[in-house]
Amino acid sequence: MLPASDLNQTLAGALLAALPQTQCQRCSYVDCQAYAQAMADGTADINRCPPGGEEGVIRLASLLNKEVKALNPNHGAEGPRSVVFIDEAWCIGCTLCIKACPTDAIIGTNKRMHTVQEAHCTGCELCLPVCPVDCIKIENASGTSTGWSAWSNEQAENARIRYEFRSIRIKQDERERLKKHQKTAQTKLTDLATHSRIADPSALERKRAIIEAAMARAKERSAKS
């Protein structure tokens, strides 16, 4: 028999697969995996995923041997699958939507027009509140089909893979940023008197202590990531 912790992880994985992978945070969790883990832990109910709709609740209830219940309206209502598009005439190229998109569905660079790759957009709408010029619009992508009827398993799997790849990339970028800062700080620390306008030896030592403490915190963050 598997240990309780392994059983919990196996259940969380099954629950994750039963979610449509919009990564929309409407369930009040940071992503679908966090929601799945909370359900496996018994700390979240099965009716918090509007994109999955009624069919989604049925799938989750079956996995957890629970009774089916209506979607919690506090988390939204079941509806068609949506995608967004950018009115390029109004886009200012701020890149905020690119940073907010959980599946890297938006492409573009700073001060250049952005474009949504419709095939990869999950309709999470996380890009809407960050757009400073409201140039992002929503379109119905599934007609009258709602919930899991508006999705395919292939679309959900594609969204999951893209989200996981993005998460890995962000962590790698953060590690590289920390390494760069650590290298700069170490160079400065090696010859602090040359890299500082402070002449007082006691003040220099206080600054050295501050830099060393900051480097220790950065090293700790890097070890956890």
Image: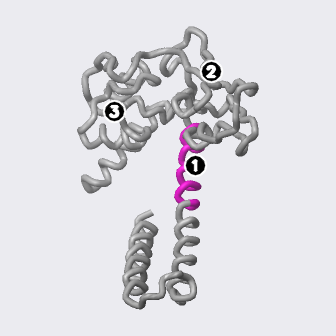
Q: Is residue 141 magenta?
A: no
Foreground: 95 or 33? 95
Q: Which residues are magenta?
A: 159-173
For the point 33% across and 28% down, which residue is it?
Answer: 62
Residue 89 percent across, percent down from the top left: 75, 25
Foreground: 162 or 193? 193
Mark before the other along the chain sequence, 3 or 1: 3
Q: Nearer the viewer, mark 3 or mark 1?
A: 1
For the point 41% across and 91% down, which residue is it?
Answer: 201
Q: Which residue is mark 1?
A: 166
Q: Which residue is mark 2?
A: 137
Q: Nearer the viewer, mark 2 or mark 3?
A: 2
Amino acid type for the residue under numbered disc 3: Leu
Q: Which residue is mark 3?
A: 63
Mark before the other along the chain sequence, 1 or 2: 2
Amino acid type for the residue under numbered disc 2: Lys
Element at label 2? strand
CB atoms of marks 2 and 3 within 8 Å: no
Instruction: In the rendered view, tell whether residue 126 sits above or below residue 79.
Output: below
Instruction: In the rendered view, tell whether residue 112 sits above or below residue 134.
Output: below
Give the CA separation, mark 2 to mark 3: 36 Å
Residue 169 percent across, percent down from the top left: 58, 55
Label for residue 68? none
CB atoms of marks 1 and 2 within 8 Å: no
